[in-house]
Amino acid sequence: MQELLKKIETKEAVFGVIGLGYVGLPLAVEFANAGMKVIGIDVDEERVAKINRGENFIQDVDDDELAAAVKNGKLAATTDYSSLRHIDALSIAVPTPLNKTKDPDISFILQVNEQIGKYLHKDLVVILESTTYPGTTRELILPTLESTGLRVGKDVFLLFSPERVDPGNPVYHTENTPKVIGGMTESCLKLGVALYSHVFEKLVPVSSPEAAELAKLLENTFRSINIGLVNEMAMMCDRLGVDVWEVIDAAATKPFGFMKFTPGPGLGGHCIPIDPHYLSWKMRTLNYRARFIELAGEINAEMPNYVVDLVIEGLNRQGKSVKGSKILLLGMAYKPDIDDVRESPALDVHALLKTRGAQVDFNDPYVEKVRFDGIYAESVPLDEATLSEYDCVVVTTNHKVYDMDMIAKHARLIIDTRNSTAHLKNENIIRLGAAG
Ligand SMILES: NC(=O)c1ccc[n+]([C@@H]2O[C@H](COP(=O)([O-])OP(=O)(O)OC[C@H]3O[C@@H](n4cnc5c(N)ncnc54)[C@H](O)[C@@H]3O)[C@@H](O)[C@H]2O)c1
């Protein structure tokens, strides 16, 4: 262990990242920037080839930094797991989605686990980064590592450290977001901290992988529940005839004990709609129902339907039906100024409107095309002529580049789910939670 610690401290150790997506690629580039040799492993041949050509495909990664890291030999990618033989410490950042029945799909972690089992060697640090249910590190990965006769804490070292990256956040990036880290033993933690302190400004060590796994789930469950609360508040405000956005802004002036969350068309992204289900699934196996998680999930999942109700109401006021209407969705990404459509509520709004017989198109400056029912549709241009062709425009994502004054001037009807039009007095605008 002392030898490995020294190698890590002097940056002679080779760092590996398995899964080169939104989480893994920034991590790999940060370590290469910090002066360590980094090998990235991914099953996606196209991604691997792009990285090796110095081409970036993740918005939060700096193009020049990636190209420089590849050029100076600090970063290389491969699909070949046998390179684990040359790696001293590795982080795993593969997807952890839900399956069709909304149960955790840990198949990606299992695939990686199998490969690690094949190429495991003494003096290897393994850090799981993928969000997962409490107990995954100990129940799934530990047995694989020890099945070879090696002992965790003595020969190989195992930790969990949740990723907190917030895509598109202009202030908090990989290095300046505090990083929680929990080791299976004291020596595991010591090595993990030595490794991660090369890149992360602040580490938050906890006593076990389970504490680290659960910390991540608490963070995202907290968001899901608070978003559920303001979404319900928005629906209540519509009935009360009060503007929820004004109410939230007023409440947010309290300097303590309140944190601002805003309503919208539903939850999106790879984290908030999914992670709480990892915890509720685990609790079900222990015969416990995670009630807050379920209720928030129910309310948030209702929001796309609620948006469709607002569209129906708006069209009705103009004597039109949804069936046969032309509807334009503004923004397919799940949040402003990013290109990620995973779990985006705009996809649900799109599908629900189509089922009701509407002709639905979308515009998104960051998303060129989206696959609906196996067929790709392209983002339509956003100009005066196009806008005036539609019976209704739904603001699903408030990308900063949207010129709401221009949009409001030319759209016949706007359903605004993001409060982008609060400054406009226009009877053809219905704002979610603002009583029309
Ligand atoms: N995206 C976020 O904002 C975010 C934030 C915090 C935590 N997370 C968590 O981080 C994890 C990774 O998420 P992501 O957004 O980076 O996913 P992603 O889909 O962007 O990237 C995952 C990568 O893993 C690769 N991969 C899949 N199976 C593999 C295998 N068997 N071997 C090697 N590579 C494989 C994929 O090809 C892909 O490149 C998830 O658990 C997620 O919940 C994501």
Image: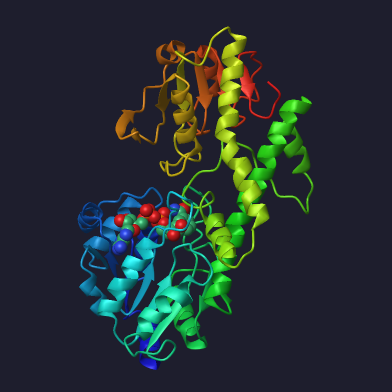
Residue extending furthest top?
319
Is residue 242 visible in the rendered image? The answer is: no
Locate the C terminus by quadrant. Answer: top right
* Residue nearest the viewer, comparing 187 with 174: 187
Give the residue displayed 38% in from the left and 47% down from the top. 59
- Picture quarter containing residue 266? top right
Q: Position of residue 388 (x, y in %)?
A: 46, 11
Q: Considering only vertical position in the picture, is 328 above or below 135?
A: above
Q: Considering only vertical position in the picture, is 1 above or below 405?
A: below
Q: Considering only vertical position in the picture, is 310 above or below 277?
A: above
Is residue 159 visible in the rendered image? The answer is: yes
In the rendered structure, the answer to whether residue 116 lies left or right of residue 420 reads left
Q: Position of residue 268 (x, y in %)?
A: 50, 43
State how many labels appear. 0
Ligand 1 sits in which quadrant?
bottom left
Locate the N terminus by quadrant. Answer: bottom left
Scheme of image coloration: rainbow
Q: Position of residue 358 (x, y in %)?
A: 45, 19
- Picture quarter containing residue 374? top left
Q: Where is residue 329 in the image (x, y as percent from the top left)?
A: 47, 26
* Residue nearest the viewer, comparing 130 with 75: 130
In the rendered structure, the answer to whether residue 39 lies left or right of residue 199 reads left
Q: Considering only vertical position in the picture, is 86 above or below 5?
A: above
Give the residue displayed 55% in from the left and 64% down from the top. 282
Give the residue displayed 20% in from the left and 67% down from the top. 80
In the rendered structure, the answer to whether residue 369 lies left or right of residue 225 reads left
Give the residue displayed 58% in from the left and 76% down from the top. 206
* Residue nearest the viewer, comparing 203 with 227: 227
